[in-house]
Amino acid sequence: MGAGLAICIGASVGALSRWGLSLWLSPGGLIPWGTLAANLLGFGLPAWSVPTVTRIGASSIVLGLMAAGAGMQFGHLSQAKALGGSVLLIRHVLTPLVALGLARAFGLSAVQSSILLAFSALPTASSAYVLAARMGYNGGYVAGLVTLSTMLGMASLPFALGLGA
């Protein structure tokens, strides 16, 4: 799964980049590929660094939301209400319904269905703001969507998990 994630992130950064190699050579482009290469070569973290890296990883959602919150301007959300509403509707209502249909179509067990449904209802990642701002798009608008998506996640996660029950 980690290898697939690194490949998807690296490919999406390259595909969305307006500037070609400049974004590939930024941390957002190098880290997924470097992590994949290190993983395939069998490298691991030194034992002394594990507690620190674990703490940093545990705080990443807070730091990401702080970054998105710093760039958020609610005025940007009024620029494209239909787009924002559509994105949030798809993310928090339609995606869990599609996941439920796929779980039933493939005959997944209750545990597998719950995991699929939980992941389908997660809020938009705060890194979307960083990518949008770095690529020259409307970072304030994306920050607002990330914040609203995080708030809607409080309702969509129980909704999605209730679908599988």
Image (cartoon, helix red, strand yellow):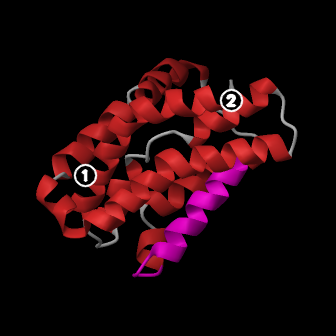
Kind of element beneath mark 1: helix
Task: Give the residue displayed 66% in from the left and 50% down from the top.
Answer: 98
Most foreground residue, 46 or 50: 50
Q: Residues within 10 Å of mark 1 (few under 14, many from 20)?
A: many
Q: Residue 30's x, y, as percent?
A: 52, 60
Range of the magenta residues? 1-20
> On the rendered structure, is 72 left or right of 64?
left
Task: Give the residue displayed 57% in from the left and 58% down from the top.
Answer: 9
Given the image, on which type of amino acid does mark 1 rest?
Gly
Kind of element beneath mark 2: helix
Which residue matches tag 2?
A: 164
Tell me the quadrant of the picture where the N terminus can be found.
Answer: top right
Task: Give the residue displayed 34% in from the left and 71% down from the top.
Answer: 135
Q: Is residue 71 above or below residue 21?
A: above
Instruction: Work out whether mark 1 precedes mark 2 in sequence or the reverse, and give the earlier one.
Output: 1
Specify the quadrant of the image occupied by residue 17. bottom left
Task: Give the residue displayed 52% in from the left and 53% down from the top.
Answer: 31
Q: Residue 26's x, y, as percent?
A: 42, 64
Which residue matches tag 1?
A: 144
Q: Is residue 10 shown in magenta?
A: yes
Most foreground residue, 1 or 102: 102
Residue 33 in sight here: yes
Q: Is residue 21 above or below residue 2?
A: below
